[in-house]
Image (spheres, rainbow, N blue to C red):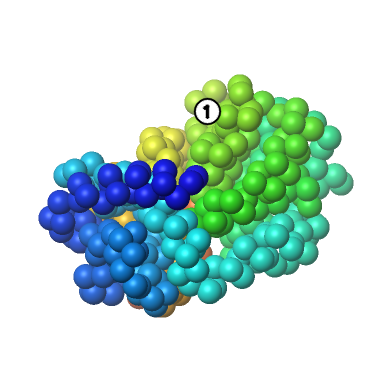
Amino acid sequence: MSDSTFFQGLDAETTICAHCGFCRAVCPTYAGVGWESCSPRGRVHLTQLMLSGTPVSSEQMTRLFQCTVCSACTQVCPTRIDLRQFWLAARAEATRRNLAPPGLGLAQANVANTGNVYGYPNDERAGWAEYMDDAPADLYQRETAEVLYFVGCSTAFSPRVQPIAESLVRLMSAAEVDFTILGGDEVCCGFPLQVAGMPDRFHDVVESNLAQVRAREASTIVFNCPACRLMWQEEYARHLPGVRMLHATELLAELSAAGRLPLNELNQTVTYHDPCDLARNGGVYEAPRQLLAAIPGLKLIEAHERRERGMCCGGGGDMEMVDPALSQRVATTTVDKLAATGAGTIITACPQCVRTLSRGAERSAPGVAVLDIVELLARALT
């Protein structure tokens, strides 16, 4: 995007901000900091200063990145600004002006050098499958398949959420789904670079992943990571006409409705957390709840803050790289509200939410468990 196009588009957005402050009441990071500059309208003002040529420091512009891009502000904005797209555009301009937090450069370097944000050897992406007792000899890596499971960096490499991948392949195997994973041929989807304000840095990973999907002849791609799904829908879908891109809950809900996913009784009480990139940003609300309703004996207690008004886990928008302490404050606040339902288990549908909410529960609600919904469903298979 040229400077003139960027400035014209962004100026149009900033000038219609009413500065009413409605966004402050729902912004999870403003609640965690308390400074006006860390509220959505404060970030809009900082962006206006940057665009007007007023000198701003990288420390000041860090406020723009102390944001999970959860879109809660968009839900209440009376002037209907698409603030998610606004934050992405503003971050891109801040990065272009060398005003982004330095830690984000490490993520870019890791993706460029290793194919994943963690900087691990990328040929270890299917390492979780190697440790499964019931994995087939091919470790789910087939030449062609109807469904391609895109595992994602966090699920592939983070020990806390690797059981999500194990659970999902067991569920798909039980339902006799023809699927494959890419193993070391999979690289980061590019989402961490997009939200870091680096839209020009993820073209190589997009092209690499597109080539792998075409080679497997898949007609459906399934993701357990909502951020991966969102990235693929926004940046990949136009290159793969006719290919469905589903979150795991959407695919599993279809299988359950078709009678291909028999589930045993689980007598426990849970509450459900709507992940921001799956719910507000991704539009998926019903599939997870349909799956929970399909488990005999399970009792769901909904939190007051749910669906479009669901609570952020604190882990989106590269927040853990920018301000891990703030990320944890947001997570702890969300856990406290979910635990107040009286449920013994928090169910979510996102690996990053599992990671952050688990740490929040360890601090403020040690008796409450945190599980991804596919982990819960896998338990109902046994």
Position of residue 206 in the picture relative to residue 18 (left or right): right
Q: Residue at 41%, 65% (x, y): give it.
A: 65
Number of numbered discs overlaid on the protein picture: 1
Q: Residue at 51%, 49% (x, y): give it.
A: 227
Q: Which one is in front, 52 or 362?
A: 52
Q: Which residue is mark 1?
A: 254
The picture places residue 169, in percent across and down from the top left corner, at 67, 44
Q: For the view shown, which residue lies furthest in the right direction?
A: 137
Position of residue 312 in the picture relative to residue 265 (left or right): left
Residue 270 in view:
no
The picture places residue 332, in percent across and down from the top left corner, at 35, 70
Q: Quadrant of residue 236?
A: top right
Check disc 1: other Cα within 10 Å, few if <14, some if 14-19, many if 20+: some
Position of residue 154 in the picture relative to residue 79 (left or right): right
Q: Which one is in front, 148 or 30?
A: 30
Q: Residue at 50%, 34% (x, y): give it.
A: 250
Q: Quadrant of residue 182?
A: top right
The picture places residue 53, in percent across and down from the top left corner, at 34, 65
Q: Is residue 91 above or below residue 301?
A: below
Type of amino acid under label 1: Glu
The picture places residue 50, in percent across and down from the top left corner, at 34, 64
Q: Secondary structure at mark 1?
A: helix
Residue 142 in view:
yes
Q: Residue at 22%, 49% (x, y): give it.
A: 15
